[in-house]
């Protein structure tokens, strides 16, 4: 009788352990390059790393999965993913059609795209009111391509964010297209109360959780679902503010 009970309990244990969600028993390893190459975010790397690390931690708690961060050099990050050294990476690889054949992508968790900056007292509130205006474009923002869709804008190339901002303030130009992380940083420091962000990011460039195609779809699902929960509760914005990544000077 005791032997029969033991056998039943034994097989019950096997059955229930086999029915557990794989993500609840298996550690999920996420590769991160703390320089965030090829993004150009000088002086903001630590903020982005801190935010990303804490975001993973909070999603792990909410989704009840074990997430371990693996710090990797930028030139080894993608190769490590392809060699299955970790389940996914955090990175800026764009979800273009040809990339979708190789990778799976989460929803965007940190937008790094360009925004329009103008003087605090400017009446400009978007791209549609820029006809006849002079707008600076900074390298790596794809600002020229964005502005060419709106006829009548006078595009002025600049190689320095502070110079473009100073020229906005002295009236030389009317605005500047700058990546959002730089815009937020300057608005919170040297140009606080002088400039404002008047658009949402103008493209979908930014950071996502990225895994090999069809290999970690459960992790992508957990990440997206956990992020949505954090946004709904307001915790996501609090994390952005904590790590000085929230556009406090924005009118959006």
Image (cartoon, rainbow, N blue to C red):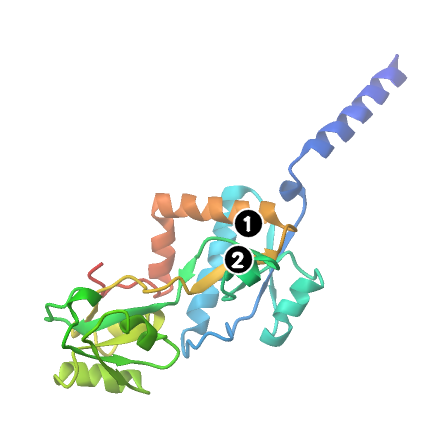
Residue 94 relative to residue 171: left or right: right
- Residue positioned 15% across, 73% down in the render: 131
In terms of sequence position, does the residue under pointer 2 or pointer 1 come before the other? Answer: 2
**Marks 2 & 1, CB-CB < 8 Å contact:** yes
Whole-percent x and y of residue 173? 17, 82
Whole-percent x and y of residue 78? 62, 68
Residue that carries the numbered disc 1 in the rendered image? 220
Q: Considering depth in this image, is 145 or 124 the residue closer to the camera?
A: 145
Look at the image and tell me in which quarter the N terminus lies.
top right
CA gap, disc 2 to disc 1?
7 Å
Q: Is mark 1 on a helix, strand or loop?
A: helix
Q: Considering depth in this image, is 63 or 153 the residue closer to the camera?
A: 153
Residue 157 relative to residue 167: left or right: right
Q: Residue 209 carries which label?
A: 2
Relative vertical location of residue 235 with respect to residue 120 in this rendering, above or below: above
Question: Residue 176 sits in which quadrant?
Answer: bottom left
Question: Residue 112 sits in which quadrant?
Answer: bottom left
């Amino acid at each position: 009788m005791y032997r029969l009970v033991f056998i039943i309990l034994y097989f019950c244990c096997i059955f229930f352990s086999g029915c557990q969600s794989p993500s609840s028993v298996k550690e999920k390893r996420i590769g991160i390059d703390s320089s965030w190459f090829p993004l150009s975010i000088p002086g903001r790397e630590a903020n982005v790393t801190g935010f990303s690390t804490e975001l993973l931690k909070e999603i792990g708690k909410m989704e009840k999965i074990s997430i371990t961060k693996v710090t990797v050099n930028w030139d080894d990050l993608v190769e490590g993913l392809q060699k299955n050294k970790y389940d996914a990476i955090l990175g800026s690889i764009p979800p273009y059609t040809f990339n979708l054949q190789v990778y799976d992508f989460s929803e965007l968790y940190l937008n790094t795209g360009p925004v329009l900056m103008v003087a605090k007292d400017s009446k400009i509130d978007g791209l549609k009111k820029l006809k006849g205006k002079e707008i600076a474009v900074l390298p790596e923002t794809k600002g020229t391509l964005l502005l060419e869709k709106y006829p009548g804008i006078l595009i002025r190339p600049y190689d320095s964010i502070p110079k473009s901002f100073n020229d906005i303030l002295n009236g030389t130009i009317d605005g500047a297209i700058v990546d959002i992380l730089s815009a937020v940083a300057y608005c919170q420091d040297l140009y606080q109360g002088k400039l404002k962000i008047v658009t949402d990011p103008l493209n979908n460039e930014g950071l996502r959780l990225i895994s090999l195609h069809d290999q970690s779809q459960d992790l992508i699902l957990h990440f997206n679902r956990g992020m949505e929960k954090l946004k709904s509760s307001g915790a996501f914005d609090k994390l952005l503010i904590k790590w000085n990544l929230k556009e406090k000077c924005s009118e959006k």
